[in-house]
Amino acid sequence: MHPVIKLVAQRLALGLLLLFAASVLIFIGTQILPGDVAQSILGQSATPQSLANLRAELGLDVPAPVRYFNWLAGIMHGDLGKALTNGQDIATAMGKRLGNTLFLASCAAVIAVPAAILLGLIAVRYQGRWPDRVISTITLATVSVPEFLLGYIAVYFLSVQLRWFPSLATVYDGMTFGEKLYAVSMPVLVLVLVVLGHMMRMTRAAILNVMQSAYVETAELKGLRKFTIIARHAFPNAIAPVVNVVMINLAYLVVGVVVVEVVFVYPGMGQYLVDHVSKRDVPVVQACGLVFAAVYIGLNLVADVVSILANPRLRHPK
Amino acid sequence: MTRIPLAALIGLFFTGLYFGAAVFAGWIAPYGMAEIVGDSWEPASAAHWLGTDSIGRDLLSRMIWGGQTTIFVAAAATMLSFGMGSILGFFAAVKGGWVDQLLSRLVDLMMSIPSLISALVVLSVLPVSLPVLIIVMGVLDSTRVFRLSRAVAVDITVMDYVEAARLRGEKQLWIIFREILPNALSPLVAEMGLRFIFAVLFISTLSFLGLGVQPPLADWGGIVKENKEGIVYGISAALIPAFAIASLAISVNLVADWVLNRTTSLKGGRG
Amino acid sequence: MSSSLLEVRDLKIEATAYPPGEAPRDITIVEGVSFKVEKGKVLGLIGESGAGKSTIGLSSMAYGRGGVRITGGEVFVNGNDILKAGPAGLRALRGHEVTYVAQSAAAAFNPAKKLMEQVIETTLHHGLMTRAEAEERAVSLFARLGLPKPESIGNRYPHQVSGGQLQRVMTAMALCPKPDLVVFDEPTTALDVTTQIEVLAAIKEAIADTGVAALYITHDLAVVAQVADHILVLQGGQMIEYGTIDHIINSPSEPYTQALVSVRSINHHEKSGGAPVLSVRDVTARYRGTKFDVLKNITLDLPEAQTLAIVGESGSGKSTLARVITGLLPPSSGEITFDGRVLPADFEARTRDDLREVQMIYQMADVAMNPRQTVGTIIGRPLEFYFGLRGDAKKQRVQELLDEIEMGEGYIHRYPAELSGGQKQRVCIARALAAKPKVIICDEVTSALDPLVADGILKLLLDLQKRENVAYLFITHDLATVRAIADSIAVMYQGRVVRYGGKTEVLSPPFDDYTDLLLSSVPEMELGWLERTIANRKMAAAGN
């Protein structure tokens, strides 16, 4: 078997293993921590009867490993359990929200990725000169402000003062695609700002690293044009590090989404998770945590696989 | 000694200002933390330099008290993550073998879930109190410190001078404290600044989501939450913590950069 | 205007230095350099590190590496001042009129592209030939440079061929567009000695066949003596001496050139006999988790106050032997004896006195000293650790040791970063001596140093041996060093000792095949050595 296929298969297996381990960790995090879950859900004023009922409902009378495997078996069949607070089926409730969140995140990615790569290239091209400095200063500022504040600054100036965009991102069935895009413009803007800084800084570093290598000097001493050097010699070697940067930052976006959805009251996964954390609705929190972990692990896996595929030493073994 | 560059001076000044305000909050805050002194969202005036908040408390006082909470929680979490992360990281690097494997794989696992998600999952069952917040943030963040200190220490343990010390017959403690630590210090100190900033952002985010510092205790993230409705009416109270957090983060960043540059360029620095 | 192919007049090159903790400032790295290269001739640029030789070489392509700037003088190529050429003019010059061969071909090739693509890239880019013609020329150059499978090697990727082959492919790449001048920047320095001679011969033949002119940059006078017509000696960015190869090698006028020519002419009389202080008995070793023996049945004796040189190329297992002796790598069989008793295999099981008796000096003095400790601490620690010396007694002894390594007052409070390369290695020697050992293992201690500095270190080691009666196990790939200081020699090849005995015996015929190859590959500081050696080898091959 070709070594690349073997390596990729290994990575995929490792990713599955990691996801499995993450599910154990999430389970441990919610079930085996010190303190009584039922007590902390119902608060100090709970009656012994209601405590006992809740324990039974949560299955707390069964040993933890058994509960874990029941939960896992359910997930395998697409059954994420029922919410404690309203008894709704979690999978159904989550489906639409997951779609909304992915819509929001992909809109942000579609803008942020090309913008970050372009800005990174500009910063490299004018390294140390004013375009580079301006870009670095702005990114330092956006990196230093938490997502929710970025959100409110945007709302304050763009929605309230200038009245360009809606301050709440309300989406519902039956909206046209254009209406939806307009509705999410503010959260998308904020998400783009959140990841752009990191992504652009890391892209800049990755490309600089390639541009300083000896083979780029060789190309320069061959009398090639700057553009030819970048396109033929720098670019093929920069793919892997840049894809890596993009994936790491998209994973970062997954976290940013949680906060931004709350700011703009957007009906997605993040708001769903935060709501149910406050309500101490453990089954929903577990399910959401697992979905977020899966997306995060998946993106990191893609980054790994791309860097394997882009490595000429692995593609063309001795 | 060389002069302190301007950027570092600015950073030092503002970092000092914020920490000073946090330590002496009781003396400099004009009003009590939860004292209602006026109408809601009064504009800035001589009596209330930043105006009042959603229920008529003095915003400047809230900011000073809030800064105290935010900085205290972040600093405590940073110390915890540093203590745990660096000790375990060094230990893994020097010991190697299965100890290293076990710790490293555990950290990989913890880092496979974004820390905000992990925090939310855990906080859904734990009582939300300051000690719990500090421990949760400290433990989650210690994974990053572990990776860095392990990597730095592994780089140093393969150096010939460490081998020379081993061959001389030096004890493990001498090797860690005299050979490795002095050379690992500057990247770790710079990292400490970054971790502190991260902790400030983290606790503010949790509080904003209503899962961090609980009212009536003030903290910067909480102040945003309390005043966010005002934004729609054009009241900027919720933005004030934004500038506090951003300027604190940038100042600490500037100081950390300077520390890193200064210590690496010291006589006998690494390179 | 100039009628020469390359003429450099009063060249001045500056760079911006960023001293730590200080404001950046401009420093001059080359000044007042003038020379000419005629069509088809080879000029050797020679000097130690920091002499500015690569910088001058690249100025013939109007190129400055990093922050290096050409700030004065004129550089004419085919009569045009290339310093006044615009970007388009430079692109026409680079890769067409003048081409470049880098020291590390492994780094200079794009890892993501096939060799052929890269070799003919310039030729196609400048529109000199059609693709088919260019490929045909490349294949013929591959054949002329002695590359295996010249028709198909171009389909390989850079990581799929060896270092010596890659260096030859890079030469083919430089020759492919039929340039007027090729700049060779230390093309053989990174290679093993037996590979170096092959590459050197290939380059020399290719230069002669194509009639190209060349700038050959190197720190090794013996190497450049084989290929150059003229030599320019540089020191600290200044011209020291210029002359024909015959003049420079046989009757140099400047003291600095004389020193370079006579380097490694230390005369050391071989000692023999004597009781062994350290013995290696039938040692076989492999690294943990591997199934390959790096050392196979090694048996050696190191007599008291003498020097045993271990010679071999990279991968011969010579450094592994040092790790076995010091106890860092316990052998899978065999033992190490010291003063007649067996030492525990693992250093952690050895007594403090055992550890004291066998000291080690490393190749890279830079990383062998803790950058955060002063010279006083570095040398003082063994005194404190082994002999319990403290305070003034320790300080006094450190000063004595500094005097012994000829460094004198004022160094105790310095940090390693403030010392030169030679001084760093001296401090490492003092640290080893401080333990009053009977044996010091020297692992390539001079190979990272410039020849004159290395010479000083070797002389110091010989002096110290006489005074302190210490025995050296001297690991090196450099036969000139071995001739200078060894009493006995062991030649290692692929984990085995292939030849072992007194120095004169080992270095005199009859030889085994490998020792013969190794010895005959070391460049000698005389004209015509390369041709003679290659001719001898061809004759021997024909004879078989």
Image: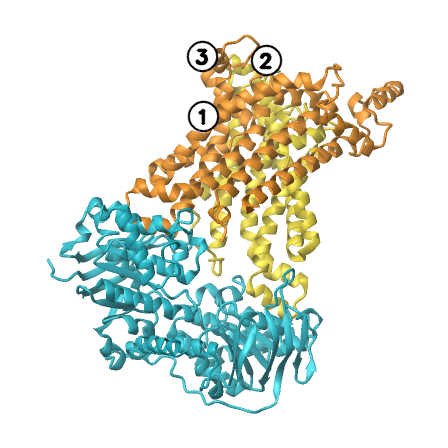
Chain colours: A orange, B yellow, C cyan
The answer to whether the residues at label 2 and label 3 have Cβ atoms under 8 Å apart is: no
| Residue C222 percent across, percent down from the top left | 33, 75
Q: Secondary structure at mark 1?
A: helix
Eyeballing the image, is A146 above or below C45?
A: above
Q: Secondary structure at mark 3?
A: loop
- Residue drawn at x 43%, y 44% is A237
* Chain ID of residue with mark 3: A
The answer to whether the residues at label 1 and label 2 have Cβ atoms under 8 Å apart is: no
* Residue positioned most to the right: A49
* Chain ID of residue with mark 2: B
Q: Secondary structure at mark 2?
A: loop
- Residue drawn at x 54%, y 39% is A305
Front disc: 1 or 2: 1
Q: Which amino acid does the dot numbered 3 rest on?
A: Arg
- What residue is disc 3 on? A163
| Residue A261 percent across, percent down from the top left | 58, 20
Q: Which amino acid does the dot numbered 1 rest on?
A: Ile
Q: CA distance from mark 1 to mark 2?
A: 43 Å
Q: Which amino acid does the dot numbered 2 rest on?
A: Asp
* Residue positioned most to the bottom: C273
